[in-house]
Image (tube, helix red, strand yellow):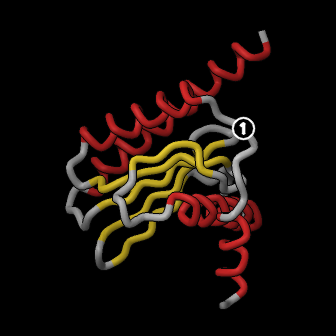
Amino acid sequence: MDVTSEIVEKISNQKPLGRISDAMRSNLVHILKEMRAGADDIMGALVTSSDGLPWAKELPADFSEKRFSAMSGALMALSTTLTNEAGRGKMRNVLIEAEGGNIYVMSAGPTLVLTVFTKMTNSLGLTLAHARRAAELINVYKTKCDESKSA
């Protein structure tokens, strides 16, 4: 097993520390379902904390929520460091284009990450727009939840 796989395995075996209520998870899943309904080429998506722990998912059965959460958090952290070191400003999203489809990893606020899995598509811009809109909704929802906790 290579070093990256070992790290992903360690992170994916961590348990969330009660960070998310059932109501919050349900609302996040609702946002993910709406995003999928708006774009036929989106196969699945998940919301994770920036440290790679799963919060909500709308994934195909053969996708490992914990492993993809861990990899998404790590990829976001590395990409943020890369853009900072290169002096390119705030990192917006990572787009992975593969033969079988695309993967978008993007910030959904300061502490959450949205990862979207798509089929191979000709409508990259439209799918990315749906993903960005979902990331905005997730950020707004999380901010409102945080504000209500502190009030």
Seen from the viewer's position, the closer of residues 65 and 90 is 65
Q: Is residue 104 left or right of residue 2?
A: left
Seen from the viewer's position, the closer of residues 31 and 98 is 31
Q: Secondary structure at mark 1?
A: loop
Task: Identify the residue at horizontal 34%, vertical 38% (top origin).
Answer: 33
Seen from the viewer's position, the closer of residues 28 and 26 is 26
Task: Identify the residue at horizontal 57%, vertical 66% (top origin).
Answer: 67
Q: Position of residue 88 (x, y in %)?
A: 66, 59
The relative height of residue 101 versus residue 39 in the rendered view (above or below) is below
Question: Seen from this angle, which residue lies furthest bottom?
Answer: 1
Q: Is residue 105 left or right of residue 8?
A: left
The relative height of residue 113 versus residue 69 in the rendered view (above or below) is above
Q: Which residue is mark 1?
A: 18
Q: Assign the C terminus to one quadrant of the image.
A: top right
Question: Seen from this angle, which residue lies furthest top?
Answer: 151
The relative height of residue 17 versus residue 4 in the rendered view (above or below) is above
Q: Position of residue 35 (x, y in %)?
A: 33, 39
Q: Position of residue 50 (x, y in %)?
A: 68, 50
Q: Is residue 90 left or right of residue 99?
A: right
Structural crowding at the residue carrying mark 1, measured as other residues with C-alpha within 10 Å and reported as few (<14), some (14–19) or many (≥20): few
* Mark 1 residue type: Gly
Task: Identify the residue at horizontal 37%, vertical 50% (top origin).
Answer: 128
Task: Identify the residue at horizontal 32%, vertical 60% (top origin).
Answer: 118
Q: Position of residue 150 (x, y in %)?
A: 79, 15
Q: Quadrant of residue 59?
A: bottom left
